[in-house]
Image: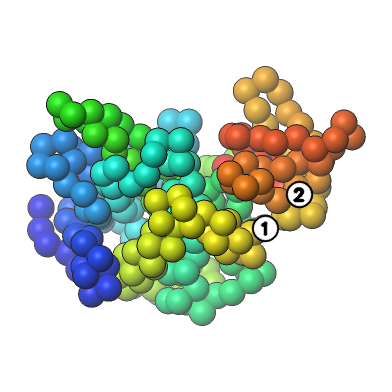
Amino acid sequence: MESGTISQEARKAGFDVVVLATTASTNDVALEQAVSRGADRLWVVAREQTKGRGRHGRQWASPPGNLYASLVLREPCEPPAAPQLGFVAGLALHDAVAGVTGLTAPRLALKWPNDLLMDGGKLSGLILEGHRIGPDMCFAVVIGMGLNVAHKPTDTPYPARCLAEAVGAVDVGEVFRALSSSFADRLAQWERGRGFARTREAWLSRAAGIGGRARVRLPGGELTGTFAGLDAAGRLLLDGPDGRRTIDAGDLYLGLSDTAS
């Protein structure tokens, strides 16, 4: 494990980082660091993952050239508010990519619940994992992020994109430094959930598909309608023939096409 570089702003806010050449999963390393030495606000970044994962246990292809980073936070909020960290992280990724590449809307957009899109294809995804750790059962959240910088997967059921397609070569270290800074800013704005109204407003202003037709795949079936935005807690609002539905979790397909994540 070697020292890495984060922004000065992030370090002043109490963040630190370790960088690995190869690991099975940056999420697993971040959790182990929290359990074994009480790490908090620690980034774990790897050049390559051998067992990266996304939502619902899906495998996340992790070859060298892309960004694979996980952040562990101890007691970041009350557990019911933890899903809001997905919006915090999504905004931070959007800020970082926009700042490094100059890409803006409509080419760069956020997709509920946790994707960053470029030109309509998936550029980045993230996963939140909550844990109770230690003898005091401390609540810890690990946020895993994968960003396609130089490469994109070709065997996905949805369109994928990478930054190299749009802007050519991008330095992964520069993207991470920008992400470490933007996450510190967005976490402070969120205020352990007290500032979620501001986070929600910022997320909605960068969201893809609002006002358009959409389909949501749920464990018990599918719902179709118009993507009407988010409620005050960050749940998806879908207007259908039977009225408005509020959805806590699911796979969102914009434009009624099979491009969910």
Asked whether 68 or 109 is in front, the reply is 109
**Residue type (three-letter) at the residue carrying disc 1:** Ala
Residue 47 position within the rendered picture, expressed as x and y whole percent measured from the top left: 26, 56
Cα–Cα span, label 2 and label 1: 11 Å
**Residue type (three-letter) at the residue carrying disc 2:** Ala
* 248 horizontally vs 215: left or right: left
Q: What residue is rendered at 22% in x and 53% in y?
A: 42
* Crowdedness near tag 1: few (<14), some (14–19) or many (≥20) residues, C-alpha within 10 Å: many
Q: Which of label 2 and label 1 is nearer to you?
A: 2
Q: Which residue is mark 2?
A: 228
Asked whether 39 or 158 is in front, the reply is 39
Q: Is residue 153 visible?
A: no
Residue 13 falls in which quadrant of the image? Answer: bottom left
Marked residue nearer the N-terminal end (2 or 1)? 1
Residue 95 position within the rendered picture, expressed as x and y whole percent measured from the top left: 47, 69
Q: Which residue is mark 1?
A: 208
